[in-house]
Amino acid sequence: MGAPQYSIHEIDSIIADSRHAILALPLSHQYRAAVYHLATARFGRYKLSHQKDDLDRTILHLTESVLLQPWSLPGPKPSILMIFLNLAVALYLRSNDSKQPEDATYSAKYLRHLRDQPLEMFGFPRSLVTLSLLDALCVQVNLEAGNVMQDIGEMAVLCHELLTSESDASEDETTHAVTLIYEVVASKIRMGVPDQPLDQVIECLRVARMHKPDLSGVGCALALSLAVRYFMTFVNDDYEEAASVMDEMAAFRPSEESQDEMVAIAQGIVTILAIMRSMVHRTPENSEDAIHRASTLTSALVEKPELLLARVLEDTAKQRIRDFGFIEGLGAPSNDSPLSQPFVSIGGSDEPESKYGLRKDSKLLEELFSKIRNCDTTDIEEVIENGRAILASSDPRRHGPFTFYPFDLFGQILFEGFRRTKKTEYIDESISMRRRALEFPSAYLVGGPVIIHSLALSFLTRFLSLPDRRLQDLDEGLKLLSQGANLGYGDLSVRVQLASSWATYARLARHSTVSAAYEGTLSLMQNALLFAPTLQLQHAILAKSSHHYRAMPLDYASHHIELGQFKEATETLERGRALLWSEMRHLRASIDQLLQAHPDLARKFAVVNRDLEELIKSIPPSLDLNMDGGAGDLTVEDPFGRLLVEQRRLLNERDELISNIQVLPGFDSFLTSPSFDTLCSATSPGPVIIINHSSWRSDILILHNTSPSLIPTPVDFFGRASALKDELLDARNKHGPESGHYNQILEHVLKELYDLVGKPVIDRLRQLNVPEQSRVWWCPTSVFCSLPLHAMGPIPSDDGTDDRYFSDLYIPSYTPTLSALVPESDHRESESLTSGLPSLLLVAHFDVPLSPSEACEDINVIQALNTRLPVTSLISEGAKATSALDGLQHHQFVHFACHGTLEARKPFDAGFELYGNERLTLLDIVRSRVPAAEFAFLSACHTAELTDGSSADEGLHLAAAVQYCGFRSVVGTMWAMANVDGPDLAKYFYKSMFPRREQGELVPHYKRSAGALRDAVKKLRKKRGITPERWVNFVHYGA
């Protein structure tokens, strides 16, 4: 509209002529065309003079022309649609000049009406109306008239339409539309603002970026929108896309100074976003990404970037301390609160730092929280009133990452007030405050599962504390625990706590979600274990976890038993125990069948397994983070971080391969948890007795041929068993196994074990028609892993003759899991039967305190076997770690005669003392592969003993390690052995193992080892002066 081709003087003449013509007509005969022409003339003069009066009169004349009659004479006539369009344009221009929102509102209303008309029928360009509506909405948004976020959403939809439909808009017009969008996004889209139309905006900007790749502002606006949505939903794809956009912009470095500034902004946004992601999704890859981006950040956006990098490194170091325990060289965190440090802001804000860090009201509330925990109960009401006043005085319009914190903090104050006074109004208000805190998306970013846990416990506390228990509180509390446990982000250890709390409270209340809670806990426990890159660190996670945490699989199994689900209980115990051994067995799982059907896939899987096994069994580098160089050259040397990232890469690749394999015909169960039927195949040689030690209920399950047979236990079973274990270990640690006191305690423990376990088991075995002298396997849990179940007694006899013990009635063995007994194939067994007598490797070394005669006697016993089977001896100087490991590759049998050592809280450092102060450690053995292995006799101290601080249900001892690396049967010791017993036991054992004349059914030699040990121990027991600890010490593991 308008006549810009004319000068002001010419337009003045046109206006004068138009006015004269209109005035010459009576009011009743004024026509639309005449008034419209006057309006266009005045609008043309406004564009040249920018006089407000011209714009006001333009709007007046356009309004009049809408109401007047159309022109009846021949000639061009103005369209009513064009008049409405020009009126709308004039209105939003006046609104923009005067900053009055009413005109923009009317303009948008008129333009929306026009868009509903069939414009194409009149040859009217729809794009012109759409562009004008975009301009009007932009003015309305900038003036904050109406619903700003709704208007931005409408702008995004309109712009998307212009870019994707068969629009008649020109390149300049679409560029103008896109520019309006990204400018509005840059000024209005912010974290913490509710109801933002992020989905529409992001979709529009994605299309705009494809159509207008040279508009750098589009990329920044898209990244900003993705970042804000990420802070609300924590969907990792949003971060990845934002980072990709910013990286592309940073890689493109134009010469224009404004573009350089845009690149700096882009770099800053993605850096802060990476730091936020590392706080939310606490994975090694995310921490490494944050460190990398912080180390390359320039000072264009963040003052003193080296301080930002130092902060990121410090946070990463603190997180590693929380994940993996205290590490030498790194100080403990200065404050456990995640809110203890100021938040990093983007851009040079003039706001005080407190806007991005802790606000003043938060600090005052922290002081009150400290006070309410220590003050007299009479002062609690005053403290809470002060808290209410502080909260009421805070600015409710303020947005920032810690806006939620005062509400959560005051909720804590109220909860503490209820805890100390039991006033119902305090717990009610606490719940209200904590709910308010979770209304802020940043609460999930900074506090995440911790805040959800707090609110859940408030509901559950109210449910348990008040006389009129509200089931709604129970449901709400359990729902929150479930929500927190199933978050896809946040500290994994906290999520495990949430899941275990969910399971505990659900079971207490007999809630319908018990099984789901236990399942979630087990799954998270396995994920938490894999979070650590090496076996040693994985064990450290298990060892430092609470007893409640480690008991979850046992508790879940007890829940199954409570429901009569014995098969499911068996499967659960198999899944939840010996996690480290299970993980390692999966890395060495047979792929023969896969190799035949899909050789390429099998080879890829084998390579990934090999690389992952090598990494998992490596010695982790230092956890220290080092920053080299100055502010201009920031680099991070972090080998531990690289190890974490490599482990995650291999795990992801392995998981993808497993998924691909499991969809193939016949491979749906590949590397899934073994079914009950599979586990039952372990019981074909004899029954397996599982003792589940749970504080909820303890039970004994006997697996033998048919369905599991349940032996209920007395109510005091759990406590009595725990007391027996403590009593035995205390006596051994304080007095030594050779002391009279220890032997007295041991005799007492054996007798109590018979009453508690032995008698009911023997009775049930007889009911199941399991004949005496049959082989049986103990599969203990918890405290029973340290108790001598094989030697329970004495057992009363009918004729009152010599005392008998469990091993007199049955041939006992131990197994850490049922899977350890499941044969992979019949190939090795048939090969063992046809290969004749096995070859034996002797590894012998004694420094002190063994006398030469004792040492020679031990060695002579084994070497005397050379007349019957080939024996290779590694003695003294020949007994080195490398030689021993090499020898294991080529012999079916091995006999270690040396000292065994334990390292407190370091089970992988347990080992055999060899020549030259060398040690063959548990980790060395685990790393080795022994294809010919069948049987190992570990005639050394502590070879089947758990180290102090080790997780009992992981079974991390030398005997288990030897069994894992390939030996089917192992003889070990539960504590320090008497040196004089080694030769005698070996002599008795091998005499029974290799009789001069074979009798009975032909079986592989390693399967004879359990019976041979039982016979040897019986002979040792009959020697004069043999105390109980000397014969009870020896145990058999495996087939």
Image: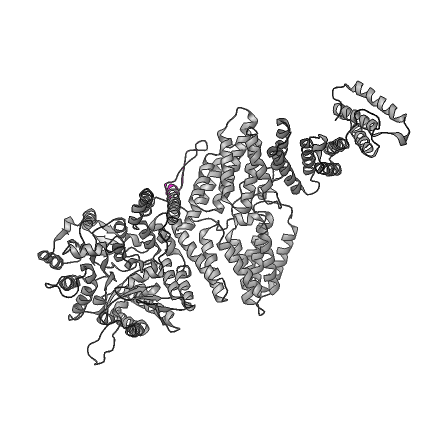
User: In which quadrant is the N terminus drawn?
Assistant: top right
Q: Is residue 362 left or right of residue 663?
A: right
Image-quadrant location for residue 863: bottom left
Of 44 and 734, nearer the camera is 44
Q: Is residue 743 left or right of residue 292?
A: left
Specify the farthest residue to the bottom.
799
The x and y percentages for residue 782 are 35, 63
Residue interval drawn in magenta: 625-643
Q: Is residue 300 visible?
A: no
The x and y percentages for residue 900 are 23, 56
Count of marks overlaid on the render: 0
Of 667 and 862, nearer the camera is 667
Of 171 and 48, nearer the camera is 171
**Residue at point 33%, 50% (across, down):** 535
The x and y percentages for residue 974 are 25, 62
The x and y percentages for residue 968 are 24, 57
* Placement of 946 over or under 64, stated as above or below: below
User: In which quadrant is the C terminus drawn?
Assistant: bottom left
* Placement of 456 over or under 127, stated as above or below: below
Within the magenta stretch, is there residue 639?
Answer: yes
* Placement of 746 over or under 429, stated as above or below: below
Within the magenta stretch, is there residue 401?
Answer: no
Q: Is residue 1032 visible?
A: yes
- Color scheme of the displayed model: one colour
Of 264 and 185, nearer the camera is 185
